Amino acid sequence: VLRKASDYDLRKYEENKILAKKNLVLCKELVTVHKLEMKLLNAEYTLDRKKIVFYYKSEERVDFRELVRDLASRIKTRIELRQVGERDGAKALGGIGFCGRELCCSTHLCEFDTISIKMAKNQKLSLNPTKITGVCGKLLCCIKYENKNYTDLKVGLPKVGSRVDTPICKSCKVVDIDILRRLVKVSEEGKYVTYPMEEIDDGSNK
């Protein structure tokens, strides 16, 4: 941080956003003219307006030298084209997630953490790809938010498939667990019964 933004800086920032959108339209027109296989996502100026950065996605390497020359001759400033991945693309475009809120990546996430399918399994989430992937096609960033809590809450709970003692049954098979409420469902005398963990003896105290 160099200093607090002044009113002049804020006005310049808003002016830059308007101008960047205008030049994004221009760039899209030139991309069509040059028949380039690239999808423009966003554009932004540096505060001093000495450089404008165009963000794009592409499945292959793009030779945009002619495009840059045309842009530079019209915009009269330094041009940078920056290729981004799927998550950065979603961050640039923005949108609404399954939760009904704006995408985390475009509102408050400054960097992308590693998300794994193991985290989804740890939270007993549906492994249906349509339910655990975001608009970027990658695993939802929010899967990591509560993963540590689930890991901590699972401590002391029996595993599905293990055997435990209940108040009326010895060596009952665990068929399911409710991690948040710490409930254990067992197969007991031909039916399923759920007990709070306090009433379960998994042999750890023997």
Image (cartoon, rainbow, N blue to C red):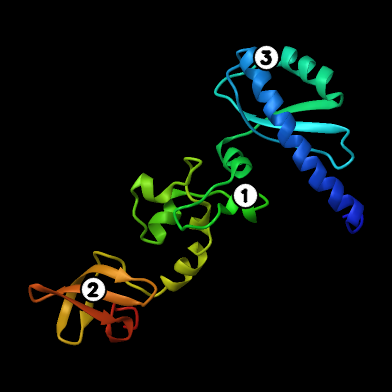
Mark 1 vs mark 2, CA separation in Å: 40 Å
* Dot placed on the residue nearer the N-terminal end, 1 or 2: 1
Q: Secondary structure at mark 3?
A: loop
Q: Which residue is mark 1?
A: 106
Q: Secondary structure at mark 1?
A: helix
Judge left or right: residue 145 versus residue 15. Answer: left
> What label does residue 185 carry, if any?
2
Judge left or right: residue 185 versus residue 135. Answer: left
- x%, y% of residue 201? 28, 82
Q: Amino acid at mark 1?
A: Ser
Between marks 1 and 2 in the image, the one whose residue lies nearer the viewer? 1
Residue in the image at 45% along x and 67% along y: 150
Judge left or right: residue 175 versus residue 99. Answer: left
Within 10 Å of the Cα at label 2, are there few (<14), some (14-19), or many (20+) other Cα atoms?
A: some
Q: Amino acid at mark 2?
A: Lys
In the rendered view, would you say 70 is above or below 203? above
Q: Which residue is mark 3?
A: 63
Camera-nearest residue between 196 and 139: 139
Between marks 1 and 3 in the image, the one whose residue lies nearer the viewer? 1
